[in-house]
Image: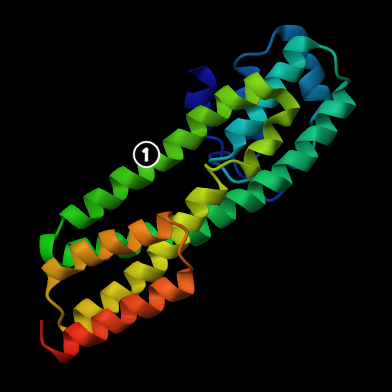
Amino acid sequence: MKILLSNFFIQTSWSFAAMQELGFLTSLKMVLSKDSQKKMIATHKGIFNTHPYMSSYIIGATVRAYDEGIDTPEEIKNFISISEKSFASAGDLLIWQTMRPALLLMATIVSLHFGIVGPILFLVLYTVFHLFHRIKGIYDGYSRGWDVIYCLKSTRFTSVQYLFENLGALSCGLLISLISLQINYLLIVPLSVFFILLLVRGISRVTIIVVFMLLLVLMAWTHL
């Protein structure tokens, strides 16, 4: 719990000189023994920078390494250096470039007819996803140790990113259709469900998008 709470503030002491280093060390200091704290402070002087939501994976694994006392401080530092770059890249791609834009587009569509419900929906869904990674990251980091880096190949990254890439493309098309083509809003719901079902079944994305756009054009042409 201490790690989780401190992880929310990992960027509050952000600086150009050390990036998230001070927040990272503070999170570690919360749970390490005094001897481990001295080793940690003596070893980790420099820059730490990763995706803030993914930092919990690295923190959990680092705490385990110090608790076991098997690895040298230099080995731990090398692990942190490698993992911070890997999780930074994966987090930026999953959260900033894929999930957040898709959720914003979906919230905008909902807002067109339901007002404030759209922003509330965005905040709830976005909070659920980032809390999941913060909490799960601490648990997996400590339980898997250095192998936590292999989580980047798990469905929570690959499949979720694939899903939101397509939901973002779908939402972008829907938003344009709702605004410019004046399509009946109620017809969008079953079409969206149909789109997602085809996606889950592994149908080609190009095929799905072409069929979906043809249906939208047909509906606009017939004034549905």
**The C terminus lies in quadrant:** bottom left
Looking at the rendering, which quadrant does residue 18 occupy? top right
Q: Mark 1: which amino acid?
A: Val
Colour style of the rendered protein structure: rainbow
Nearer to us in this view, 125 or 72: 125
User: Horizontally, is 14 left or right of 172 in the view?
Assistant: right
Q: Residue at x 69, y 37 (%)?
A: 150
Task: Tell me residue 88's x, y (percent).
Answer: 65, 48
The answer to whether one can see residue 156 in this image is yes
Residue 37, above or below 124 = above
Residue 181, above or below 9 = below
Task: Tell me residue 124's x, y (percent).
Answer: 29, 43
User: Horizontally, is 98 left or right of 182 in the view?
Assistant: right
Looking at the rendering, which quadrant does residue 37 occupy? top right
Looking at the rendering, which quadrant does residue 80 occupy? top right
Q: Residue furthest bottom?
A: 221
What residue does disc 1 label? 128
Q: How many marks?
A: 1
Task: Tell me residue 217's x, y (percent).
Answer: 25, 86
Q: Residue at x 43, y 64 (%)?
A: 166
Nearer to us in this view, 87 or 44: 87
Q: Residue at x 57, y 57 (%)?
A: 93
User: Horizontally, is 167 left or right of 194 in the view?
Assistant: right
Classify 10 Å Cα crowding around label 1: few (below 14), some (14-19), many (20 and above): few
Task: Tell me residue 163's x, y (percent).
Answer: 45, 56
The answer to whether one can see residue 21 in this image is no
For mark 1, give the secondary structure: helix
Q: Residue at x 17, y 53 (%)?
A: 117
